[in-house]
Amino acid sequence: MNNSQHELPAIDREYHRIILGYCKGNQDITLQLKSVLGKLSNQLISPYVKGLPKEDKKRLGNLCELLIKLYQDCKAGGKEKQHALTLNEKTLWLSSKANGRYYYPYYEQIGSFDHMESVGNLALVDIRDIKGAFELCQGTFPTCSFVCALQSLIYYMNPDQFVSSLIQNCSGGTFLVVFYFNGTRRSCIVDSSTSIGQVRSITNPNLKWPALIEKAFLQIYNCQVPQLFSGSNFANDCYLLSGFVPEYISINKLTEEKMNQIFDAYVNKHTALVALGTGELSLDAMKQTHLLPFHDYIVEKLEKNNHDYTFTLRDPSKPKTRAFTYVFSKVCRFFQTLYMNWNTDKLFTSKINVVFVGSHNHKFNNESCIENPQFVVKANPHGSKRETWILVEEHLKKDTDEILDSKIQSIRWFEGDKWVWGPNSGLLIATFNSNGTRFILSKVWLPKTGSLTGVIEIKRDLGDSFVYSVNCYSNFPAFLSRPIRDAFSVQFDSLWTMTESGGNWTKNTYLNNPQFEVFCDEGTFVVNCTIGIFTQKDIHINAAIFDNDFSEFKCLTSFDERLLVAGQPTEYRPGYEIFSVSLQPRKSYVIVCSTYDSNTLEEFRLRVKCDHHLTVKRISTSLGVFEERKKRTLSELQNDSWNNAYCFVLRRSSKVVLKVRFSTYIREIELINKDTMKTMFDEINVKHKTVFLGSQKHSIPSGMYVLRVKAQNSKESIEIGATLGTDYRVELLPMD
């Protein structure tokens, strides 16, 4: 091996790191790219490269072309109209790390030039040898599902073509294995060393490449001690080896109709591979059936017998007694899962793949889905429904070997392309639950409108983000995207505190709750508005919106059911509440966010969205630029005449707001100008113990003003607390 040959592996490793840096947005890789391109140029004219096969020379040329595009993109500061890599391709590169190692996307037009020194007893392995490939047997490693998947694929596909697409001999006893995971085909480099316990051929002891593929398989799962491998399953491993779409069918959910579909796909159309997996088995069941617990079996043959089926199974762990035939109805209870892997190339003409990043970070633990990861499958509207399959693959974690437990619990499908706030926010089409793996397959029909929104339900006890790929299969052009955000949407994070938690609307303290002003400031048409309030699931809450257009105050000053906007709920619901109302243009409204219990102190989130622009503001609890507070007790009241309570002097005109709290109910209250004895605001018949007087919209002239009340019972004394809000500092004085 000459020096020129030695350069290619180093270039291979370096260009992978450079592309990863490019995808991370590192702009300082220009010099590195220039250096690699220089090395490649030297390689292309070297004697070693001149002696390479034409196909290898072409791969080197393709690598040069990609690196030149990256160099031009970096030189332009990322402002090129046509980037070297799309956003989705960049995300796939950024998803290359799994369990502490990097597995870069595999480009067939480039391949790999990487290699390591020859290690172990398999420096010379003929990967073109398929003799004995139909008689594979599991070794001592607990990899029954992998062996089942590998053997089934060899049965199903052209063995030569399948093996050449799966493993390549780099050089020097190093092999490139190409697996499907983390959204794309990825390169896994392994050396030639193996161990006694690996998969082997019963009839050809020299068949070694299956053991190399198994080694790469265990490496991806970060299995340091193969004998302690916790196991996978047939459907997962078949996808890893071939990209065939996995489906998991619980045995107790199998119906005659479903079995007919499986038979048709497996026997008649040859569009799927089938395997069976057991769960826990008793000793009696094991003796009766010769089955092993938590073990996968290849379905070699499936026959229909009236309304029943006969399965011929192959056990990958038994080198001698390998095939067993069962009448399914008699032994189905001993199995747990039927696995199917679909060759979608035979079913669909179109496939798209998009990588998304989701978050586990739910602020609240309620049952809403506004914080859930969501995506949209969309096509042009059509006169009829059209079948679409969507496979969601959760990517392997970067730095842990805990990879088999799924974070995704289910996917719910809603008609439309808008962001879904709650389970009742749209028309629910279907729900698909996870079986505990990293994959969920949804078989849905796109409605005539042409769009569905998938809402992913995730485990709430995990705080980090996760990456997932969405693969869409169809026989028509389809698209994947994020849900459409509304034309106008606003969010407020707030909380109920000791001073701002007034309880439900039946309480006198209701007005102490947080309030928000809503103003429709554009257009002449009715505004369709959706309001949502969210908090922890065990707290009963309500968001009520009132017509406040004729009020002199920005805040709501009294609870009046007649002011409630039509179409909203009045009950209190746990965790969250979502409703839609119609608002009139150029009018003011107030939203009051309340809990049922006034002792509840908790965070909440208010969201408002609509199809036109709205102004939404948190209403300050302050009554004016300056506030003055006083308390006093009135005794010996005359219930048929006015009793003076407070007075204040305005040196110049000012907006005036008085918030007065009483210890008991009174009959009337008013504010008068002492000089003219004119009532400044309409007399108020008091229905609550808290009363507002004044205006936040209009000013009153200078002068002395007196606040006075009429009592309901002259024998009682009344405690009065008053807060005066004005444009400048004004002293509030008790007055007898």
Image (cartoon, rainbow, N blue to C red):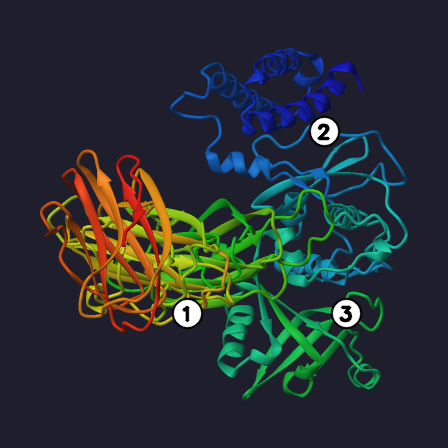
Position of the C terminus by quadrant: bottom left
| Secondary element at tag 1 | strand
Q: Between marks 2 and 3, how big is the CA–CA gap?
A: 37 Å
Which tag is nearer the camera, tag 2 or tag 1? 1
Label 1 sits on what residue type? Arg
Q: What residue do we see at 46% from left, 17% from top?
A: 77
Residue placed under numbered mark 1 in the picture: 573
Residue 310: % across, % down = 64, 81
Q: Nearer the viewer, residue 535 or 74?
A: 535
Q: In the figure, is residue 2 to the left or right of 733?
A: right
N-terminal of the two: label 2 or label 1? 2
| Secondary element at tag 3 | loop
Residue 18, image quadrant: top right
Q: What residue do we see at 43% from left, 53% from top?
A: 605
Q: Which mark is residue 32?
A: none
| Secondary element at tag 2 | loop
Residue 146: % across, % down = 72, 58
N-terminal of the two: label 2 or label 3? 2
Q: Between marks 3 and 1, how big is the CA–CA gap?
A: 54 Å
Label 3 sits on what residue type? Asp
Q: Between marks 2 and 1, how big is the CA–CA gap?
A: 61 Å
Residue placed under numbered mark 3 in the picture: 315
N-terminal of the two: label 3 or label 1? 3
Number of marks in picture: 3
Residue 646: % across, % down = 27, 51
Label 2 sits on what residue type? Asp
Which tag is nearer the camera, tag 3 or tag 1? 1
Q: Nearer the viewer, residue 431 or 594?
A: 594
Residue placed under numbered mark 2 in the picture: 114
> Measured along the vertical axis of the image, is residue 49 above or below residue 91?
above
| Mark 3 neighbour density, 10 Å: few (under 14) some (14–19) many (20 or more) | many
| Residue 381 appearing in the image | no
